[in-house]
Amino acid sequence: HLVIDSMFDKQLEISFDITFHSIPCSSLGICIMDVTGEQQVHAEMLNHEIHKTRLDLQGNALHDEPIKEHPGIINELFQYMRMDRAAEGCQVTGKLHLQKVSGNFHIALGSAHEIHGKHIHQFVMSDIPRFNASHTIHHLSFGEGFSGQKLPLNGMEHTIKEPGGGVFTYNLKVIPIEYVSRWGSITHSNTYG
């Protein structure tokens, strides 16, 4: 049966675990934008649970603890030097807590800024030929999990074999659902497609 989602006061939790095989953590920015005009250009610095783990090119962690970067000119200057030198990957894991309105979150090369009302990513142009967005989505979910839940992007891997970069875009529709277990307990969650 059809149920209308009346829980507009609740926030949507997005949980993710994505590995970028050839981009250093310091060269990745995480941004959130929604139709209300709210932009969070340094999501990893805000009140979200986001961690980046540096990886070698075989996917092994280079540090025992995930790193949390902090904004500032030293970090940004370091970021620009890293793309030339670092043969690393990055595993980005976390949870975002967002308004239940249309919008997007993205993980992109460079440091994000809002300039004159426009959302831009700042990076060095010479980095583009070395930018390889090959990635594996280990986990992506919207809301609380439940038994038998289908998460179609989990395990999805995209590899760029040609030099010169590449971008991947996933346009998803998030659909609120109400899951009732065989014991009668109700879970308010979401599916996507």
Image (cartoon, rainbow, N blue to C red):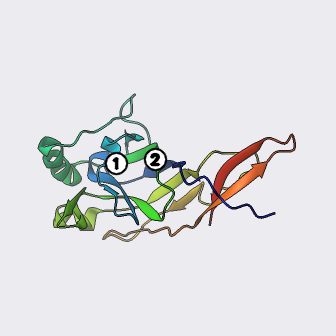
Q: Position of residue 19 (x, y in %)?
A: 45, 50
Q: Kindly identify the residue that appears in the image at 13 percent across and 42 percent down.
A: 74
Return the residue nearer the eye: 148 or 13.
13
| Earlier-in-chain disc, 2 versus 1 | 1
Disc 2 residue type?
Answer: Leu
Q: Kindly identify the residue that appears in the image at 68 percent across and 49 percent down.
A: 188
Instruction: Please report contact status of discs 2 and 1: CB closer than 8 Å, yes or no.
Output: yes
Q: What element carries label 1?
A: helix
- Identify residue for label 2: 96
Residue 159, placed above or below residue 57:
below
Q: What element carries label 2?
A: strand
Q: How many marks?
A: 2
Q: Kindly identify the residue that appears in the image at 75 percent across and 51 percent down.
A: 179
Q: Left or right? Give the position of 1 relative to 73.
A: right
Instruction: Determine the image quadrant of residue 124.
Output: bottom left
Disc 1 residue type?
Answer: Ala
Q: How far apart are marks 2 and 1 (CA)?
A: 8 Å
Q: Left or right? Give the position of 145 relative to 166.
A: right
Rendered image: mark on residue 130: none
